[in-house]
């Protein structure tokens, strides 16, 4: 463990003092001018470029510990998410600069009007206060989350995965220095490098210190937070996303969209997991799609878990297995998909209602009527007509990044950007009005 | 594993079927035209006028049970909240018509733009789905909540207090008939008249059926819901509201505002509980205020729990006791107040930061600078300059009523009106765009 890390045990007074400092910093951040906020973000970007070696040294220690673990660690995909290099450092710096270029959401007047008795009201966008983000694996998340939370005027408590604590520890020091360089209280960022889950549990119980918790990780983490958090949650649950190819779809377009949604980056939550195909086009679409994503040209062909009708259309082809009871509830996060043939649009919508995770859903159709019905009836954060589900992220949608993708309905649906890290207060000016 | 979470009894088959019906109704409500929604609300208002006798008969049964309880029931204030009469029935009908007159929030396009590659996006206001409201005492809440939830396109599960179950049962029947009269699925309203708390516990665990829970009641209920709910909560916590009278305040205005905020309806959450007074005006303000709200002209004089400086300004007057350690954390909901003299504006803001419940706060001052600082630094849903805290409610603010007053920061702060019962989805139209 890094001797300079800021470990605190769950029962320590020191942790209470740090939370008080975060609370106090949040008060200061409410009115912080945007020039200072931008200066801090640019400062952090400069330091990432100039002192990136310290971060890479921390990362090397985390990677060494991972590789030395019994059984060779947690696999290549996990190791890749843990890894930082010059390219990724540069991307983190670019992200900081992008957020710094955005408008300040704090103080925006969302609505202004007068009540009948002359009382004037304004609805004003304001920070949430103190946000706790619990995340796993990718250490870049620390920097992206800090930039958004800080620009939205919030103090941030960060708790990353135990496997990345040397990396995140170095990032926390660097960000803390950027704050201090511009006279901002260090409590604006509380980075936790103590891997004790008991401490996390204690944080989740402390709804006096923490206004909102954002869990970002696998189902185990989400369940732990839902079980124990006393404060409101912005939940980043799994993405069980569908593409439905309707009877009148342009099949070339359908093949391109499914290929993109499934294979462009299969390990992310906005990737497609289940393909639904209208019965009348299954025999034409499925073989063409199989040629494209499961043929010999692909280094890793996509594996299929298909219902009987889909298998019939793919008879004699490799990489096709029968769908099982659990297939249509499986988030593969890998080069695999479930496939089902449906008789009509309502059956596709029903399937999504039953199995979807309310993340991102797509219909491929030439019919505006079918598209409108799908968009109206499918209850998901993002609903696409003739476009890949892969667009569901904060950068693509111009939000300057994201703290995650919300699959709940309260507060924010879809990418959690700057605006989602604020709330709207009511402010009144009167001349003695009473009821 | 938390041992408290292992003993949730499963829902009965009948209740499971009713929840499935609510879920199915919610799907239908998503696209329901506003004309039908308005017709149902007017129908309910007509039936309240025409069949009010059935509701009053149910209410008479609840009142008789209350009065027959050992010790004469739960007191006159509770009995008054339980009581319905012709005036209150008429007010409920008026509330239904007011909500029917509002714009349909569902389908509102909050934002529309195109991404660089031509993908067009719209952010569309959509229903939350199935809302569970748990409320205590006032049976009118059932009708107000139904009108708002339904107009916002949601199915509603209602669970009222056990003391009002005959009244609410009659109201549920009446509202259900209004739905059926216009061809809307009865599952749009699931009224629960089973007082078993185990059932409530099971509902709170069922985040597949219920999207959001709104608890509306005392601290015991709120704690129970925070402890057990797996779905997001819109919390209606207590209102520990302050009025701060600054050094330069118009003292006549200050007396009028404090009188209104404290005495116009002391039992509600937007009433003032604590008075903070700048040291330089305490000797003039406090006696004048005491004359007004605690003098012989008042049938029930306001009782004071005051710090030493405030008591000194009120020397020799009746109804003044020393503030105790807990006074400044007490929500009296009665004709009583805490009073404290402070040296300056920052001390007032600090006091509110420490003791306030983030509900409604007021400053009385002639200084725009002091007002702006107070409005900026005080972290509450509603912050008033020279006006009574009593304006914090959905009717006063033009929201067509309210499902409660949110004191949390996520999703909605202050009165929970129509818009707060929706969320915003992303809807995309493309021509084959991929990443």
Image: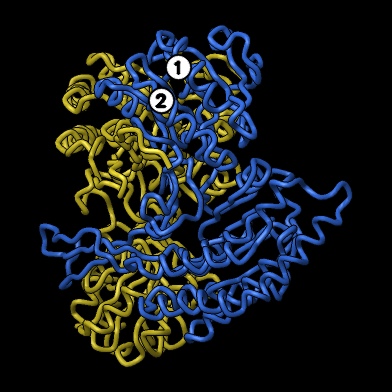
Chain colours: A yellow, B blue
Out of B200 and B85, give the one closest to the viewer: B85
Location of residue B134 by image quarter: bottom right
Of all residues, the one furthest to the bottom in this rendering is A280
Do the dots labelled 2 and 1 sit on one chain?
Answer: yes
Seen at 19% across and 76% down, the residue is: A253
Label 2 to label 1, Cα distance in Å? 8 Å
Q: Position of residue B128 (x, y in %)?
A: 44, 62
Q: Could you tell whether A385 is left or right of A405 in the image?
A: left
- Residue A31 vertical placement versus A384 (above, below): above
In the visual, does A58 lie left or right of A387?
right
What element does badge 1 sit on?
Answer: helix
Relative depth, front residue between B372 and B276: B276
> Mark 2 touching mark 1, by CB under 8 A?
yes
Residue A229 visible to an observer of this rendering: yes
Can residue B21 be spotted in the picture?
A: no
Q: Which mark is residue B285?
A: 1
x and y percentages locating residue B102 in the rendered image? 35, 66
SS class of the residue under badge 2?
Answer: helix
Q: Is residue B139 left or right of residue B145?
A: right
Quarter residue B193 falls in? bottom right
In the image, which disc is placed on residue B254? 2
Residue A207 in percent (x, y) is at 54, 33
The chain to which mark 1 is attached is B
* Residue density around tag 1, few if under 14, some if 14–19, many if 20 or more, within 10 Å: many
Q: Nearer the viewer, residue A314 or B406?
A: B406
Q: Nearer the viewer, residue B235 or B296?
A: B296
Looking at the image, is A383 positioned above or below residue A180? below
| Residue depicted at 26% across the width and 14% down the height | A183
Looking at the image, residue B37 sits to the left or right of residue A175; the answer is right
Q: Chain of mark 2?
A: B
């Amino acid at each position: 463990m890094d001797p300079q890390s800021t470990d605190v045990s769950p029962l320590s007074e020191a942790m209470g003092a740090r939370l008080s400092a975060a609370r106090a910093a949040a008060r200061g951040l409410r009115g912080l001018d945007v020039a200072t906020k931008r200066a801090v973000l640019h400062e952090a970007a400069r330091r990432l470029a100039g002192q990136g070696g310290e971060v890479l040294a921390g990362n090397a220690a985390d990677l060494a510990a991972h590789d030395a673990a019994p059984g060779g660690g947690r696999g290549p995909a996990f190791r890749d998410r843990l890894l930082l290099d010059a390219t990724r450092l540069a991307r983190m710096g670019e992200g900081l600069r992008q957020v710094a270029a955005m408008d300040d959401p704090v103080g925006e007047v969302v609505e202004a009007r007068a009540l009948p008795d002359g009382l004037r009201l304004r609805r004003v966008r304001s920070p949430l206060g103190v946000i706790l983000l619990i995340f796993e694996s990718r250490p870049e998340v620390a920097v992206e989350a800090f930039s958004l939370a800080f620009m939205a005027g919030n103090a941030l408590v960060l708790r990353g995965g135990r496997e990345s604590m040397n990396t995140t520890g170095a990032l926390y020091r660097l960000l803390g220095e950027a704050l201090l360089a511009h006279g901002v209280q260090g409590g604006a960022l509380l980075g936790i490098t103590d891997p004790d889950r008991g401490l996390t549990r204690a944080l989740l119980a402390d709804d006096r210190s923490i206004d909102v918790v954002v869990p970002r990780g696998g189902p185990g983490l989400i369940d732990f937070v839902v079980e124990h958090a006393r404060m409101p949650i912005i939940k980043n649950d799994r993405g069980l996303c569908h593409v439905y190819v309707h009877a009148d779809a342009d099949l070339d377009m359908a093949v391109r969209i499914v290929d993109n949604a499934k294979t462009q980056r299969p390990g992310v939550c906005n990737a497609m997991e289940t393909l639904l195909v209208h019965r009348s086009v299954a025999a034409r679409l499925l073989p063409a799609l199989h040629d494209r994503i499961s043929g010999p040209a692909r280094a890793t062909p996509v594996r299929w878990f298909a219902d009987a009708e889909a298998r019939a259309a793919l008879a004699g082809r490799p990489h096709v297995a029968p769908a099982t009871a659990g297939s249509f509830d499986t988030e593969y996060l890998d080069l695999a998909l479930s496939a089902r043939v449906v008789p009509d649009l309502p059956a596709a919508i029903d399937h999504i209602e039953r199995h979807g995770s309310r993340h991102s859903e797509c219909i491929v159709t030439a019919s505006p009527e079918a598209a409108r019905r799908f968009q109206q009836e499918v209850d998901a954060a993002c609903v696409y007509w003739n476009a890949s589900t892969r667009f569901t992220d904060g950068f693509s949608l111009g939000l300057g990044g994201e703290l995650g993708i919300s699959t709940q309905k309260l507060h924010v649906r879809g990418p959690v950007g700057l605006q989602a890290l604020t709330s709207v207060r009511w402010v009144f000016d009167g001349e003695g009005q009473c009821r």
